[in-house]
């Protein structure tokens, strides 16, 4: 059964069998991968991403966690956990990049303000 999009960190952590330190590391690794994916195309969501890019991202996350001696979990459970996390973090990173882009655009052309500009 897939993990609910509204599942809490604690629920997913228990499902994965990660301790607090491992869960923190999982968050860092997935955020780094999400930043890279969003940098390549900041308009895309995790669900819209092509399967080959998702598989590559999931494998990269898995390899990093194995290097960090994370406990082995089933491929299906791992995939569900990564999908749960990446859906959230890619969206967050995408919104962050959009905010930065908007700030850069709006910061260069402000209307004349007689109070501010005198």
Image (spheres, rainbow, N blue to C red):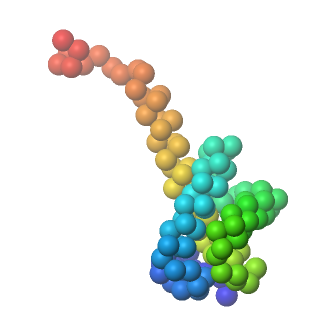
Q: Nearer the viewer, residue 114 or 34?
A: 34
Locate the N terminus and report the quarter of the image it occupies: bottom right
Above or below: residue 40 compared with residue 52 = above
Q: Nearer the viewer, residue 3 or 106?
A: 3
Query: Residue visible at 60% across and 61% down?
Result: 29
Q: Position of residue 40 (x, y in %)?
A: 68, 43
Query: Residue visible at 51% across and 56% down?
Result: 92
Above or below: residue 49 compared with residue 78 = above
Above or below: residue 117 compared with residue 42 = above
Q: Is residue 51 visible?
A: yes
Q: Position of residue 4 (x, y in %)?
A: 57, 80
Q: Residue farthest to the top?
A: 118
Locate the C terminus and report the quarter of the image it occupies: top left
Above or below: residue 26 compared with residue 117 = below
Q: Is residue 43 visible?
A: no
Q: Position of residue 82 (x, y in %)?
A: 65, 70
């Amino acid at each position: 059964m897939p993990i609910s999009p509204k599942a809490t960190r604690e629920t997913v952590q228990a499902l994965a069998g990660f301790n607090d330190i491992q869960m923190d590391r999982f968050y860092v690794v997935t955020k780094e991968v999400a930043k890279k994916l969003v940098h390549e195309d900041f308009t895309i969501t995790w669900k819209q991403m092509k399967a080959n890019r998702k598989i590559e991202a999931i494998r990269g996350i898995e390899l990093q966690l194995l290097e960090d001696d994370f406990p082995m979990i089933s491929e299906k459970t791992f995939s569900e956990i990564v999908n749960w996390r990446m859906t959230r973090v890619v969206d967050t990173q995408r919104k962050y990049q959009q905010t930065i882009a908007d700030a850069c655009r709006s910061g260069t052309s402000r209307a004349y303000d007689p109070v501010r500009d005198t």
